[in-house]
């Protein structure tokens, strides 16, 4: 009996060790301390991704479910990799959980020359998914010139469109570009948000040299368009620098959101926005100029109400220059075109150039301007260190710091 018991114990130990070692080979243990730091809460096992092919297979799978949990084991360089869109994967819906574990996806181009594929992004559609702790370097959604003018695409680096309860958190973007050709949007994170039961949270986003281009209306540094009747979109802790451009006569360009439609909820809090409204992404001579009209430092077009649109602790700088001088009155340091209402608190701008009806550039608003403006700190220079030291950023959340001149920046 003792002999049998000894054999059983040895076999049991062997099975436990084997299971542990094999699981660790492909899984990530997501453990976190609780608020008292006195105990460990056991998290979920996750599937590791380490190569371009594995990531592509994961992002384009057609059977994603909410229980899917993946993480990046290392940085992934897509140089030379062909990210193919086809009839099977161009409309897939991501419903799971991706933790980038602060690794970088680099040198990825998601390209199409086919009008069949309408939604461009790492995920064409997200419905109730989570993407967090991810860095993007030299990532681009690209449309062939042969179909750029004639077809309709909505684009974002993370997703072409989003619905459902979705979380995007802690994303770093560097030298990335988004091309679209649809009124439903081009955005640094997502082109289009819709759905009457949709609640989207986008937080802790740092973008440098981001370039957004749309042949039609609705371009935003973070979101292209929020459709009508979306209950809640929350955008917090944003540090964005780049170009945001729309070619259409009614451009609807915004540093955060291109367009928000009626009866949709949007909260924007703690954001530094440094944008220019000129196209520097698309090389065709047809588009080498500035957006045309309805340009906002924060939102291009607002059609919702003050009880639903709340903006606070936002600072805007850069250039809000229009292509046509007569269109300079359709510019706002907060909102380019407003047909709704809004609540804006503790938000300011400095050092922004505007084009007046005489065709010249000035660091002051056109007197006949019809856009919504936030207070100016300095017309032609950035605020002083003392002003920043008393300004809005809540450093207690651990996300922000200040440079030597006082300008807040998201810590990376």
Image (spheres, rainbow, N blue to C red):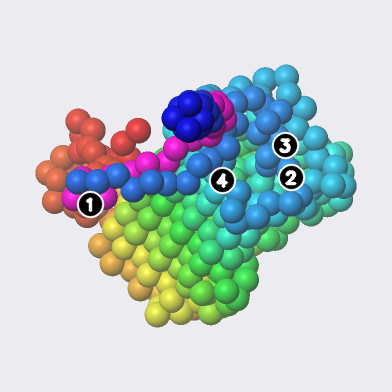
- Disc 3 or disc 4, which is closer to the eye? 4
Q: Position of residue 204 (x, y in %)?
A: 39, 47
Q: Are marks 1 and 4 in contact (CB under 8 Å)?
A: no
> Can you identify the residue that label 4 sits on?
69
Asked if the stretch drawn in magenta spans residue 54, the answer is no
Q: Nearer the viewer, residue 275 or 309?
A: 309
Which residue is the site of mark 2? 61
Residue 143 is situated, as x and y percent measured from the top left of the image, at 77, 40
The residue singled out by tag 1 in the image is: 35
Foreground of the two, 410 or 66 = 66
**Disc 2 vs disc 1: which is toward the camera?**
1
The C terminus - image quarter = top left
Question: What residue did someone put label 3 on?
Answer: 57
Mark found first going from the N terminus, 3 or 4 = 3
- Between the C-alphas of marks 1 and 3, the distance is 37 Å
Residue 188 on image: x %, y % = 55, 46
Q: Nearer the viewer, residue 108 or 323?
A: 108
> Which mark is first along the chain, 2 or 4?
2
Residue stretch rendered in magenta on the structure: 17-37
């Amino acid at each position: 009996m003792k002999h049998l018991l000894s054999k059983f114990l040895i076999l049991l130990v062997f099975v436990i060790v084997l299971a542990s070692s094999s699981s660790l080979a492909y899984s990530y243990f997501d453990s976190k301390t609780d608020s008292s730091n006195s105990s460990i809460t056991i998290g979920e096992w996750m599937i590791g991704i380490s190569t371009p092919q594995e990531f592509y297979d994961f992002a384009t799978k057609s059977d994603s479910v909410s229980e899917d949990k993946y993480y990046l084991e290392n940085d992934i360089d897509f140089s030379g990799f062909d990210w193919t869109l086809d009839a099977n994967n161009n409309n897939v819906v991501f419903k799971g959980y991706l933790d980038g574990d602060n690794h970088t996806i680099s040198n990825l181009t998601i390209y199409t020359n086919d009008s069949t594929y309408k939604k461009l992004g790492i995920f064409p559609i997200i419905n109730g998914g989570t993407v967090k702790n991810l860095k993007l370097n030299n990532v681009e959604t690209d449309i062939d010139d042969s179909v750029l003018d004639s077809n309709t695409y909505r684009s974002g680096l993370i997703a072409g469109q989003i619905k459902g309860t979705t979380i995007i958190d802690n994303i770093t973007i560097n030298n990335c570009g988004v091309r679209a050709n649809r009124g439903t949007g081009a955005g640094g994170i997502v082109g289009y948000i819709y759905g009457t039961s949709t609640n989207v949270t986008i937080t802790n986003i740092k973008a440098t040299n981001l370039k957004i281009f749309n042949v039609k209306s609705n371009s935003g540094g973070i979101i292209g368009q929020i459709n009508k009747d979306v209950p809640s979109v929350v955008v917090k802790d944003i540090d964005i620098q780049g170009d945001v451009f729309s070619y259409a006569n009614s451009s609807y360009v915004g540093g955060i959101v291109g367009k928000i439609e009626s009866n949709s909820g949007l909260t924007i809090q703690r954001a530094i926005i440094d944008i220019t409204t000129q196209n520097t992404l698309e090389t065709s001579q047809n588009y080498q100029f500035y957006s045309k009209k309805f340009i906002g430092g924060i939102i291009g077009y607002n059609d919702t109400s003050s009880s639903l649109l709340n903006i606070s602790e936002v600072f805007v700088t850069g250039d809000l220059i229009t292509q046509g001088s007569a269109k300079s009155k359709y510019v706002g340091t907060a909102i380019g075109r407003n047909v709704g209402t809004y609540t804006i608190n503790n938000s300011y701008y400095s050092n922004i150039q505007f084009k007046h009806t005489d065709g010249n550039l000035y660091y002051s608003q056109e007197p006949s301007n019809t856009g919504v403006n936030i207070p100016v700190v300095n017309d032609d220079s950035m605020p002083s260190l003392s002003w920043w030291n008393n300004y809005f950023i809540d450093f207690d959340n651990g996300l922000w710091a200040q440079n030597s001149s006082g300008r807040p920046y998201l810590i990376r």
